[in-house]
Amino acid sequence: MDVNFEYYKIFYYVAKYHNFTKAAQALNNSQPNITRAMNCLEQQLNTTLFIRTNRGVQLTPEGERLYTHVLGAMEQFQVAEEELADSSGLSHGSVAIGASETALNIFLLDKLKNFHMTYPGIRLKLYNHSTPEAIESVKSGKIDFAVVSTPAEVDSPLKQIMLMPFQEILVGGTTFTALGSQELSLREVKNYPLISLGRETMTYKFYNSVFLSHGLDLSPDTEAATADQILPLVKCELGLAFLPQPMAAPSLLKKEIVQIPLKDEIPERQICLVYDSQHPMGAAARELKNTIVAGRV
């Protein structure tokens, strides 16, 4: 069927505003031209798309079905136009990101620094989220995307991109220096005070599953609200803790803490990016997402 595609564009605006006059204003056209175009579209499709009233128009069931398809096409055209815009389109705008502290500290900070230097006019809104909170914010559309640590429970239409693997190590304060020359099993680790993140976090669930796989219960003596709190607690000799190796490295080098070798292997984890595949991003968010993904390890 050879239908003028301009008619579909006009149909989109008439259906959006439920009014020929408002559609004409949005398109910088005249109301008679808009009416004529819609009459032609109805004739070519051999169906009635609108019910005309004194207050405007209403879509018929056939019109509703057509609008569903035209709406999707218009959104895709708008995304394509943004993608083809030159870098001047990135001179302003904002991006909202959710990030767990582990992801922020061992991966994301450098990427944000480089992006800000390249696009100083773009405002970054960074939200400190646990992995479940960040994923929920992506679902609700409160943020453009999230950068978090696994495990992450991601269901369609959300998608997950792995960015960087990391390994966690067992560390303790200097009073546990003697343990640095030993090799402990997880069962032996339970003989010492343990620090972990709270039970509502995915990190807690991860270690709970690790301990359960060895027939053990995870029963920390101290639960921290954020990952950044764990290292100071270790330095204050409140107990042993599992930390990402990159976060522990500076304090290990200064001999403020000690690494305690383990007989049992701790599975590798990942930093990942989570986004909604059905939610179009603005140019700034899309560019930052691409920058982050391009820098994955």
Image (cartoon, rainbow, N blue to C red):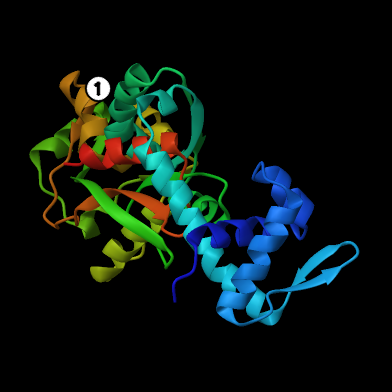
Q: Name the residue under label 1.
A: 256
Classify 221 as above or below 236.
Answer: below
Towards the viewer: 171 or 193: 171
**Residue 42 point in image, percent of width and height:** 63, 74
Q: Is residue 2 visible?
A: yes
Towards the viewer: 160 or 178: 160
Classify 124 as above or below 223.
Answer: above
Which residue is rendered at x = 68% and y = 81% of the image? 61
Classify 124 as above or below 268.
Answer: above
Which residue is rendered at x = 41% and y = 17% of the image? 120
Which residue is rendered at x = 56% and y = 76% of the image? 44
Q: Can residue 102 be seen in this view?
A: no
Towards the viewer: 207 or 201: 201
- Identify the element where label 1 is drawn: loop
Q: Residue 191 vs residue 93: left or right?
A: left
Q: Pointer 1: residues within 10 angstroms few (<14), some, or many (20+)?
A: some
Q: Residue 134 vs residue 206: left or right?
A: right
Q: Quadrant of the N terminus?
A: bottom left
Location of residue 238 (image quadrant): top left
Towards the viewer: 7 or 297: 7
Residue type beneath disc 1: Glu
Q: In which quarter of the image is the C terminus?
A: top left
**Residue 172 point in image, percent of width and height:** 26, 35
**Residue 49 point in image, percent of width and height:** 68, 75
Q: How many numbered marks appear?
A: 1
